[in-house]
Image (cartoon, helix red, strand yellow):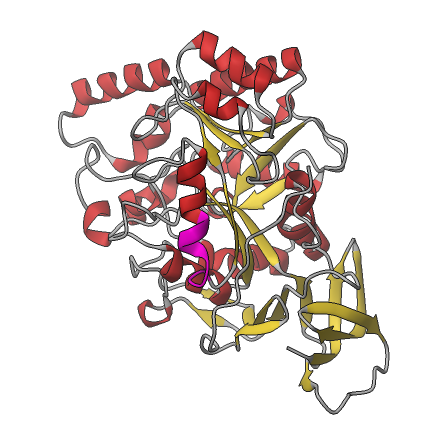
Amino acid sequence: MNWLIRDAELINEGQRRVADLRIRGGRIEAIGSGLAARADERVLDAGGQWLLPGVIDAQVHFREPGLEHKGDLASESAAAVAGGVTSFLEMPNTRPPTLDAAALEDKYRRAQGRARANFGFYFGASNDNLEAIRRIDPASTPGLKVFMGASTGNMLVDDPQVLDAIFRDCPVPIITHCEDTPSIEANHAAARARHGEAIPAEIHGEIRSREACLKSTQLALELARRHGTSLHVLHISTADELALFAPGPVEGKQITAETCVHFLHFAREDYRVLGHLIKCNPAIKEASDRDALLHAIIEDRIDVLATDHAPHTYEEKKQVYDKAPSGLPLVQDFVISALELVHEGKLDLTQFVRKACHAPALRFGIVERGFLREGFHADLTLVDPHGGTEVTGGRILAKCGWSPFLGRRFRARIAATFVNGRLAFDGQRLADGIHGQRLAFAR
């Protein structure tokens, strides 16, 4: 557990500087120049590679329990650490969904000793679990996930009185998926009338339309402002929604916004080649939306960058539109695909660290993670900025075995991932041992 990382370029709190970092007992003991190696330390010469705080993916679906043929906590957390992600916050729409304290604790029990990255699990909302929501232990979860739009299972909250009470009484931040179901259903019916069973993938963004996103997001913000609710809106996909959110640092904001890495890479024209492989909810839309989202990150209107990692089997995704499920496996490619935007000059490196490391820790009260600070847990992502990564099938660790980036070459490479001071990935393969821990939330 004791390491000395020498000559790394530390990317932290808006600064870039070359320094050494000492790990001792699972924590960052010292950051400085010319640190002398001790007899019980392993030395890693970084040679100027980028050392980031361990990346936190604040939105993933790891499919356990109930959908383990798509992924599970072991397989998807392996993909996470191989991609430089050291902590994840996982969504509640499993089978059964996480709608009470017993189901939440079952997930933590499942992750212990199996998750290679640190873990936190969201509580879920439905039309009939209001009392369980009111009894949430604020230290047990990063927040309450509310589907204000179409969802699987028993997790669509469409009763206005229940929705109002949730926003009024919830003791933790509310995290929303915002799409207006009646709008989507009307668009879908019109598409079926035109195309029958052969709905083309490229009109997914018309069915899951920008109007559906905007209407639902406006409702969420109206409720949050009425009740003073701490609200985080997930996976913003349109330029239209951006004006609803204030620019500025995440600290002190009552209402925050997130987008996902696939919205920064793909646009409508990519459906022609990738089809349902990039079908997701909300939908990937126009190139103009992609550009607006990138600008919103730069101006701090978007606070958090995540993946919404949601694996499905390749066979499931190759079905016709109405049967092909929505979601992309992205956690292993999160860091390298985001850093490609840095190489392209579309995103600043310190901005990426702010959105994928600092902001998730601050927004969800994650204790002593998300920063390179002495005394904090030693979660670290070491990146070789010019090492190159070819996205091939043999590299993929997610159980589904595919990636929307298959065949792409990114300029960066994950050189090492440390979780709680222990080497979890050495740049080539997973290290021995399972070192993920339950995240603590300061509330």
Q: Is residue 181 left or right of residue 342?
A: left
Quarter of the image with the C terminus is top right
The question of residue 9 being in magenta is answered with no
> Can you say whether 108 is above or below 233 in the image?
below
> Can you say whether 65 is above or below 406 in the image?
above
Q: Residue at x 57, y 34 (%)?
A: 137
**Depth check, front residue: 103 or 159:** 103
The question of residue 110 being in magenta is answered with yes
Q: Residue furthest top?
A: 161
**Residue 249 image offset from top left, x and y in percent:** 76, 37
Q: Is residue 30 left or right of residue 292?
A: right
**Depth check, front residue: 145 or 303:** 145
**Residue 382 image offset from top left, x and y in percent:** 62, 70
Q: Residue at x 69, y 72 (%)?
A: 25
**Residue 345 image offset from top left, x and y in percent:** 65, 55
Q: Is residue 441 visible?
A: yes
Q: Is residue 304 left or right of residue 212?
A: right
> Can you say whether 108 is above or below 5 in the image?
above
Task: State which region is magenta.
Answer: 108-115
> Can you say whether 79 is above or below 309 in the image?
below
Q: Quadrant of residue 18?
A: bottom right
Q: Residue at x 47, y 74 (%)?
A: 433
Q: Residue furthest left?
A: 197
**Depth check, front residue: 271 or 401:** 401
Quarter of the image with the N terminus is bottom right
